[in-house]
Every structure is written in structure tokens, then in C-alpha cells.
Amino acid sequence: MAAKFNKILIFLSILFGTFYLLLLLSSYGTVRFDIMEIVNIIKGDVTGVRATLYNQLRLPRVLVAFLIGAVLAIAGDSLQLTLKNPLADPYIVGISAGASFGAVLSLVIKEYFGLSINMDFLAFVFALISAFTAYFISRKGGRISVTSLILSGVIISFLFNAAVTFLVVFTWRNIISLHFWSLGSMSGVSWSDFYKMLIALSIESVIYLLFRRKMLILAAGEEHAVTVGVYPERVKTIVFFNVAFVSALCVSTAGLIGFVGLIIPHITRLLFGTDSKLNLISTLLIGGIFLTACDTLSRTLFQPTELPIGAVTALVGAPFFIYLLKRKAGISNG
């Protein structure tokens, strides 16, 4: 009973802490805002240039960063459970690299051939291709080892990143454009991106809840899953489609952002365990506030220059990745 009460206290701290931190982080930037000023702007009691600046630039950026962080964290948790692999993550598996290639390809096709192909759709197609390619390459004897998954993800990432570089250099001849897709950025996001990512998070969360029990069964082993009536390949296919879909939207909105889906699920499981009803909301909140904090650092650390957000997440995620690789903690690879 005491353990359950402690988990509820931790959850409530995360919940209320998230709202406070969102207000606090949105106050930092080239233009500083007081927290009470922000509250009054949101209430509509303050108008003018500063209110417009906050409502049209600062607030959507903070909220989009939060939603993308939440989406990537849930995606990482889904992959780790389904593949029974503590190092599974859209970025590491190569899904994000495939989505990046699809997004850039849609721009090139429009620029040079005059054909308008929806960026989100093409990013989704190549994210899906990279997801299943990594899965089939790394699968041996009905198992996916940690090493083979990482190697296949690295190979696919190199392949698609090289393809993106080729498209950028030989069509646009502007290597600076590559930085957005390779390192990520929240600059230029708008309220339309917020609504798009809100829909993505809603769809992802519903699918996660519908298949949560089956993913947990898969995490215990595919042999056990079959005996209780769970079809592993069917669940994996749905999870891959879900992760590819949301990863494509994240990449087309903010470029490549790594390690969020790797780090956050482990933090959540450390706080609440693997099988907890609080995991989804906690993963969502922690992932969202983590990426919001990283974005705040990226736009304030070296003002007026903006540091790519992917560089910030990598500084945190790379050491964590090495730690997990050495310990193989979290979900055993069997």
C-alpha cells in the first residue's frame, strides 16, 4: 500500500511539475517573460507586441516540442516492449533516418519535377521501409539480439543519411540545409504543427492502450505470447506502422531528434515498473518536458545563435546509450 501511495505521489509531482516547467521554460529566450506576465497573456488580460510574440512564436514552439518529445518517448517504449530490446528507439533503429529521406525527397520532387507529394506521407512510407528492413535484417532464429538491432539500425541510418546528403548537395547545392534534417530544429513551427502533433499523439496513445497488454506479454517472450493467444508478428506490424507514422510526422516537423525514445521509457519503468497503468501518462509527460528543456537550451545557450536540438539530446542520450549497452538493463534480451 505504501509503495502504491509513493507512486501516486511521484505521478502527481510529475503532473504538476510539468505544467510549472512548461510555464517556466516558455519564459526563456531572446525575449524574456515573467511567469505572471505569461499567465496574464494566456488569460487574455495582456495584449500588444509582447503578447503576440508569445502567442504566435514562443507558445507554439514550446507546445510542439512537448508533443514531439511525448510522441517519441511513447514510440520508444512501444518498440522496447514489442522487440524485447532495451535499446530500441526510432532513431537508433533507423526509422527516423528513413523518414528524413522521405521528407527531403518530397521537397526535391516538388522543386525539380513540379509534383506535389505530401511530405508527411512520403516520410511515413520510407519510415515504414526502414522499420521493417531493420527488423528483418536483425532477426535471426526468431530472436532479435541487441547487437544485431543496433548494427542494422546503424547501417540503415548511414544509408538514408547518405541519400539525404546526396539529394541536398546535388539538387539544392546548399549543404547548410542538411543541418535541419540531420540535427533537428524547432524554429519555424506554428500552431498548425501543434494540431498535427496533437492528433498524432492521440492516435499513438489510443493504439498503445489497445495493445499495451499484448506488448507486455511479448516482452515476456514470444513463446509465452503464442501460448496465451497473442500473435507476435501481428502485434509487431501494428506497432511498426504506429511508430513509423508518428516518427514521420516528428521528422517532417522538426527534423531528426534522437535518444528521446531511448531514455524516457527507462526512467518511467525505473519510477513505476514495467506493468503500471501510470506508465503511458508518465512517459508522455517526462518525454515532453525533456525535449522542451532541450529545446530551451538549444535556443538560449548561445544566443543569438541557435544550437540544433538533436545535438542537445545526443549529449544526454549518448552516455545513457553506452550505459545501457554495457549493462543491457531495462528489458532483458532473453
Image (cartoon, helix red, strand yellow):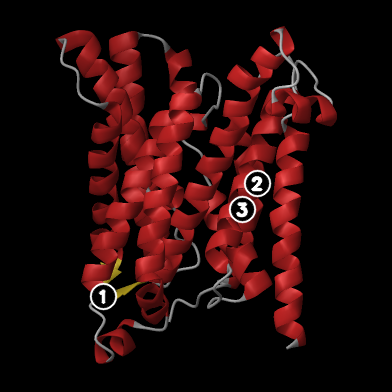
Residue drawn 60% across the image and 76% down it: 273
Residue drawn 22% across the image and 40% down it: 125
Q: Nearer the viewer, mark 3 or mark 1?
A: 3
Tag 3 and tag 1, C-beta contact below 8 Å = no
Amino acid of disc 1? Pro
Q: Residue 296, position in %: x, y?
A: 70, 31
Q: Which residue is mark 3?
A: 285
Amino acid of disc 2? Phe
Vertical placement of residue 44 versus 139, above or below: above
- Report the Cα–Cα distance between label 1 and label 2: 32 Å
Dot placed on the residue nearer the N-terminal end, 2 or 3 = 3
Q: Residue 65, position in %: x, y?
A: 57, 36
Q: Residues within 10 Å of mark 2 (few under 14, many from 20)?
A: many
Amino acid of disc 3? Leu
Residue 238 sits in which quadrant?
bottom left
Q: Quadrant of the C terminus?
A: bottom left
Dot placed on the residue nearer the N-terminal end, 1 or 2 = 1
Numbered-mark total: 3
Q: Residue 139, position in %: x, y?
A: 27, 68
Toward the viewer: 316 or 148? 316
Q: Which residue is mark 1?
A: 232
Q: Quadrant of the N terminus?
A: bottom right
Q: Give the side of residue 176 with respect to residue 39, left or right.
A: left
Q: Which residue is mark 2?
A: 290
- Report the Cα–Cα distance between label 3 and label 1: 29 Å
Toward the viewer: 28 or 41? 41
